Amino acid sequence: MTDRIREFLRNRREDGPCVVVDLDVVRANYAAFARALPDTRVFYAVKANPAPEVLGVLAELGSCFDTASVAEIEMALAAGATPDRISFGNTIKKERDIARAFELGVRLFAVDAKAEVEKVARAAPGARIFCRILCDGAGAEWPLSRKFGCDPDMAADVLEHGHRLGLAAYGVSFHVGSQQKNVEAWDGALASAAAIFEECALRGLPLSLVNLGGGFPAKYLQDVPAAEAYGEAIFRALSRHFGNHLPETIIEPGRGMVGAAGMIEAEVVLISTKSDDDAMRWVYLDIGKFGGLAETMDEAIRYPIRTERDGDAVEPCVLAGPTCDSADVMYEKDPVLLPVSLAIGDKVLIEATGAYTTTYSAVAFNGFDPLRSYVI
Ligand SMILES: *Cc1c(COP(=O)(O)O)cnc(C)c1O
């Protein structure tokens, strides 16, 4: 926790769970990415945390923005980004949203299917497209499955289709899975990207861009490699597959940019056991899966949890949220170690919660407010 967050929480008077985001950490993370990959442009993935202050600081530092909807495009513009610094990176877009983005000046669109290419060709004539390819997500704690991307073998056809319809076939993108702890994870996808570049060149369509996606981790319970290690591994893989003809590259960090910048403060509402024979304590907080901690789904992301009683003896506890939905249990298969002395009313700090918390928080499910956010 940073001193600024500690100080802010000491003076906070409002009730209820909240996340506090320290912009100094966002600035430091941006600088680390810029240093690690000096020839790569940063397109911050807005969905990770779209707070206007976060977008504003990043826009000022020179960041570009990866957006998934017209609303996110408008937020990036409001933060001071010009449209040439915005990509519409969602492969699943309504044609009228593509048209709106085009009206707003956006000229760079993700596609992964011919039907999507046709929408872009009609609604954003002449725009640049990059084709997203499937990536298995091995090594990621939050893999992105098969929802996005086409088989690499199909990518040249998708891009050529765009070219025939008057679009600029611009490049290839992929995402190696979020919270990717293997710095070598980019290698396989870059081999595929290089093969697509070659195939497109043979068809008379020289490509320019490789969009390396997100996946850069935040530190939760376990240590993660530094941005520098990712930069080195990615540069090696680029050189291996593209030789002396390195493509233009961009990265789209979300979690790695803002995860470590945020901290949630929550409160213990109840501590109980389920039977006289079962000593396992259930600790219920005033925040859970619907209040911002959705990434605890399947216990995928394990946040570090701190209490004022750290240092006392600990025991494993089930950790759950406050709503009346039985899915609102965060850690049960693999319980968390919490102080035996923890008591109802205690404050609990949940670390590294700057990414995918406010945006994943339900609006008043069960009457609980969405997660309150302070950016300092
Ligand atoms: C969500 C998303 C990202 C950000 O991923 P992180 O793992 O949080 O860095 C980047 N690119 C696209 C297209 C995304 O959908």
Image: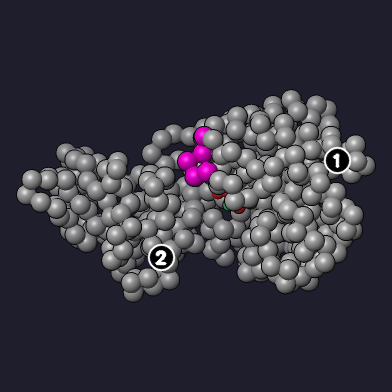
Judge whether residue 204 can be spotted in this image.
yes
**Magenta extent:** 139-143
The circle on residue 371 is 2
Badge 2 crowding class, 10 Å Cα cut-off, few under 14, some 14 to 19, many 20 or more, is: many
Badge 1 crowding class, 10 Å Cα cut-off, few under 14, some 14 to 19, many 20 or more, is: many
Q: Quadrant of residue 87?
A: bottom right
Q: Quadrant of residue 287?
A: bottom left
Name the kind of residue labelled 1 in the image. Cys
Judge whether residue 1 can be spotted in this image.
no
Name the kind of residue labelled 2 in the image. Leu
Give the percent coordinates (x, y) of residue 162.
84, 54
Ligand 1 within 8 angstroms of badge 2 C-beta:
no
At x 66% / y 48%, what residue is drawn?
149
Q: Eyeballing the image, is 190 above or below 278? A: above
Question: Which-is-in-front pick, marks 2 and 1?
Answer: 1
Residue, far left = 276
Give the percent coordinates (x, y) of residue 344.
17, 58
Secondary structure state at the residue bearing disc 1: helix
Question: How far apart in space, not on screen, are marks 2 and 1 (Cα)?
Answer: 46 Å
Question: In the depicted view, which residue is nearer to us: 168 or 352?
Answer: 168
At x 89% / y 44%, what residue is drawn?
205
The circle on residue 200 is 1
Left or right of 126? Residue 283 is: left
Give the percent coordinates (x, y) of residue 16.
32, 67
Give the percent coordinates (x, y) of residue 242.
79, 30
At x 79% / y 49%, what residue is drawn?
158
The circle on residue 302 is none
Q: Earlier in the sequence, mark 2 or mark 1?
A: 1
At x 39% / y 50%, what residue is drawn?
296
